[in-house]
Amino acid sequence: MDNKKSPTKLAKAHWSDIFLEYFFRFAASGKIPANWFLPTVPSGSEKASNSGHLSLELVSHCWNYAYLLDYQLSSLVNYPPTKLDLTVTIFYSAEDEKTVAMLDFFGKKEVTNVTWNWQELPKEMLFRRSIGRNKAALATKADWIWFTDCDLVFHEQCLDSLADAVQGRKDALLYPQTEHITTLLAEDDPILVKGAEPQLLDIDTNTFSVMKVNRATGPLQITHGDVARSCGYCNSISIYQKPAKHWCKAYEDRAFRWLLRSQGVGIDIPSVFRIQHLFKGRYKEGTLNSAIRRQIKRLKSI
């Protein structure tokens, strides 16, 4: 008997996935109660109120963005925390050779209070960002876990300010009230070109503009460790834990806030910088989709 799926079954599975993705985008808008999919979130009495020298886990993904990851990891070498122990978890695929080279370079550097934690995934699992985030959330031993992207830079006093800001707090979800951003950088911008080869770099903070943040967006989701271990990252939504053949737009960020019943609480954390880039390395270049994405991003920046 032939065990291969028929084209009809494959088509049905495909349309089923599309339906589920649109359904959860609708649900996460608040139109459906979150407790249908996550009955409870740990209450105040179920969360530790930790203080003193804390622990933090940073969770990032990288697919064809080694030139951005260089700046992120450099910032952790240049400005390591002194008031907390930091675990840096990076999910990557062995097929992304530039990212592998970048991780090899930084993995050899010993940094006080910093532990490197490189986590290889098949690219199909990497393409659904919530899979790695969920794995990290369920396994973390940290007091707090910061879900971020590889275009974020943690500059001087950033992580020590975070350590001060979370003393004794029990919030499920926090975020920095401000971030500093570049303009949209072209692929040949000197900043991105410099990051192409593994090396220790720094940013010119004068080239960034301040932007107010009003909710815990995808790269700015700081979650209480007890909440992460209990709830995972969209652990109860099967479509967000399903491998994909291409990079998936991260609609699960919104679903995560919906499940936690929180848009997050803003805290004062200086020196959060983000390198905005026009070229999307994770999407296939030369396709109609990639051209449309670039044009939309240009319009949003005007």
Image: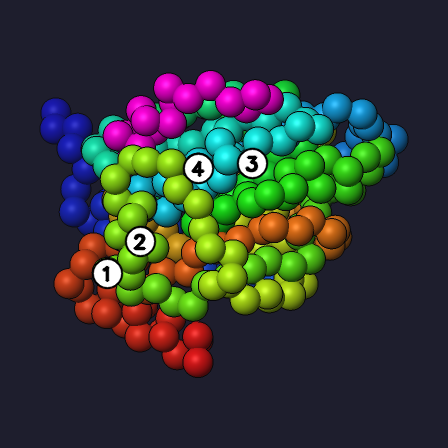
Residue 103 relative to residue 5: left or right: right
- Residue carrying label 3: 79
Specify the label residue 74 is tagged with. 4
Q: Looking at the image, which residue is at 12% across and 28% down?
A: 2
Amino acid type, label 1: Asp
What amino acid does circle 4 point to?
Ser
Question: Is residue 252 shown in magenta?
Answer: no
SS class, disc 1: loop
Secondary structure category for the residue under label 4: helix
* Discs 4, 1 touching: Cβ within 8 Å: no
Rate crowding at label 1 as few (under 14), some (14 to 19) or many (20 or more) other CA atoms within 10 Å.
few
N-terminal of the pair, mark 4 or mark 3, is 4
Q: CA distance from mark 4 to mark 1?
A: 20 Å
Pointer 2 residue: 192
Foreground of the two, 237 or 76: 76
The answer to whether residue 298 is visible is: yes
Segment colored magenta: 99-114
User: What's the amino acid at mark 2?
Assistant: Leu
Which mark is on residue 188?
1
Q: Are marks 1 and 2 in contact (CB under 8 Å)?
A: yes
Q: CA distance from mark 4 to mark 3?
A: 8 Å
Of tags 3 and 2, the one toward the viewer is: 3
